[in-house]
Amino acid sequence: MSGLIERKKVSLQVLDYLKEMIQQEPYVNGEKLPSEMELVERFQVSRAPIREALTVLTAMDVIESKQGGGRWVKDHTLLSMMEHIKLGMVTIDEVHSLLEMRHIIETEAAALAASRATPDEILALEQALIAFSETVVSKETIGNEADSHFHFILVKAAKNPFLTATLENMKELLDHAIEFSLRLNMGKVEKRRNVYEEHKAIYEAIAAKNATAAREAMNTHLVNVRKKLGDSRI
């Protein structure tokens, strides 16, 4: 790739270029990446899209920062996962904002669900949790569909039609953000199990009609998700 990068989705184009670059010599052997300023000069863009692209690669455990400065290729074998990420319509900052919105909405939705969920909704939530648990040990299943289903059952159980409509209108974007987050745990059974345990704590609090515990469990879960994706605002 050469020449100026188009303004449209600049950070995603930078990400694509970096993905190609670190699959080639000498980077494939774990070499140091060019500095941010060198990449700025190479692509003729501002530092913001460069940092967004580097943040994605860091979050995916493909590159790492080392003592003394600079970023180094860590494990290029994870690049194959990135080919399937469906985040072409949003930047990493927008993913952070989506998760911030979820954090604001779903912590209170969990508390409301603990107070308002019917026995049928609690059963549906339990079944969604079981479906999610079956993805924990799988090396091929991401688990995003089961995860997304769990959260949408919970929101509906809060019995606020405007709350439900808000998330339904953004379902595609939210689903992509969940998929993006869960892909980072592929092949990492312990991390996947931790995510399951977080969902289990949410379910148990709602089933016990404990609004305070449900709020706290959801808060813990979404704080961990936001930290994993490098949201510096949390």
Image (cartoon, rainbow, N blue to C red):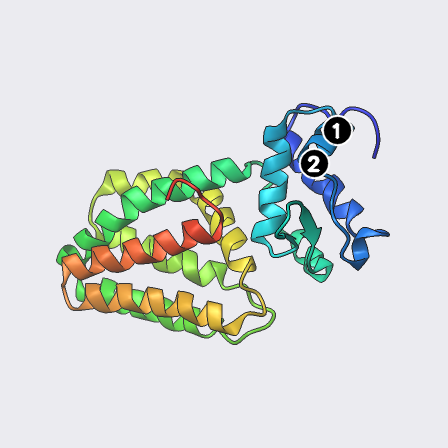
Q: Which image quadrant for residue 234?
A: top left
Residue highlighted by disc 1: 43
Q: Which image quadrant for residue 16?
A: top right
Query: In the depicted view, which residue is nearer to us: 44 or 213?
Result: 44
Sequence-wise, the earlier of marks 2 and 1 is: 2
Query: In the depicted view, which residue is nearer to us: 47 or 116?
Result: 47
Q: Is 181 placed above or below 100 here?
A: below
Mark 2–mark 1 distance (CA, rounded to whole Å): 8 Å
In the rendering, at what x and y percent does residue 98 appear? 42, 40
Looking at the image, which residue is at 20% across and 63% down? 206
Q: Which mark is residue 14?
A: 2
Q: Residues within 10 Å of mark 2 (few under 14, many from 20)?
A: many
Looking at the image, which residue is at 49% across and 59% down? 144
Looking at the image, which residue is at 82% across and 26% down? 3
Dot 1 lies on which element? helix
The number of discs equals 2
Q: Is 92 placed above or below 44 here?
A: below
Dot 2 lies on which element? helix
Residue type, mark 2 in image? Val
Q: Is 153 placed above or below 167 here?
A: below
In the shown orientation, is residue 141 left or right of residue 82?
A: left
Residue type, mark 1 in image? Phe
In the rendering, at what x and y percent does residue 94 appear? 48, 36
> Marks 2 and 1: which is nearer the front?
1
Disc 2 vs disc 1: Cβ atoms closer than 8 Å?
A: yes
